[in-house]
Image (spheres, grey):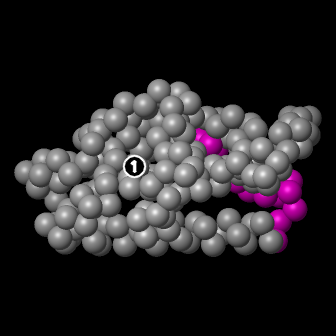
Amino acid sequence: MVNSFFDHLNKYIKIDKHDFEKIISYFQVLDVSKKEVLMEAGSLCNYNFMVLNGCLHMYYINDKGTEKTIQFALENWWITDQLAYHHHRKTEFFIQAIEPGQVVKISREKEDQLLSDFPILEGYFRHIYQIAYGASIMRTKYLFDNSKEEMFLSFSEQFPEFVQRVPQYQLASYLGLTPEYVSEIRKKRRS
């Protein structure tokens, strides 16, 4: 699985196997089980996670005790509470595995050292964060411009792998819908 990380990096920057062996030493490789919690609300957010295989989600629990999903991560996606990670603060979010899989994680201190030792990775992370920021802007646009049904249908067309792999209640939460409404939309599409 670590080879998939090498391939992923090489989509954005060019590194050889020798440098990659040094780069991977800054990370911890973790096997995660379904429903395993990797980060808990109230804890110091000291890690950034990248999914090698599997699926993670980030969520918080609102005042009513309802879980609200705000982000998913599939293969080659990064996930953490970016503000808490950047400012060395406690997080308000949980990160949990939806599927069993494997992730790499890096601490803030190791990431700083990695970027100092391998400045080429600054370009990699710039690309990744630009893509993530752009996706966040598009999500906001969908929330403002689309009906609930249009939002679900658009998301389903653009990210069919999520619809297949993510439990309906988490997908509904992410889109600001109820699981019952998602069921209605799916029934309507089948008929």
Q: Residue at x 32, y 60 (%)?
A: 108
Image: 30 above or below 144: above
Quarter assignment of residue 44: bottom left
In front here: 164 or 77? 77
Residue 139 x, y percent position in the rendering:
68, 65
Image: 160 above or below 98: below
Quadrant in which the C terminus is drawn: top right
Residue 64 x, y percent position in the rendering:
82, 48
Q: Residue at x 86, y 57 (%)?
A: 148
Is residue 156 highlighted in magenta? Answer: yes
Instruction: Return the residue found at the far left.
Output: 18
Residue 23 appears in the picture as rendered? yes
Please state if 149 lies on the left or on the right of 30 as rendered: right
Is residue 119 highlighted in magenta? Answer: no
**Badge count:** 1
Q: Residue at x 30, y 47 (%)?
A: 5
Residue 54 x, y percent position in the rendering:
47, 35
Q: Residue at x 77, y 44 (%)?
A: 65
Residue 131 appears in the picture as rendered? no
Residue 140 x, y percent position in the rendering:
70, 70
Please state if 118 lies on the left or on the right of 185 as rendered: left
Give the class, few, some or many, for how many residues have Cα within 10 Å of label 1's Cα (few <14, many ≥20): many
Q: Chief secondary structure of the magenta span?
A: helix
Quarter assignment of residue 123: bottom left
Element under disc 1: strand
Range drawn in magenta: 145-162
Quarter assignment of residue 52: top left
In front here: 105 or 17? 105
Label 1 belongs to which residue?
50
* Residue type at the position of mark 1: Met
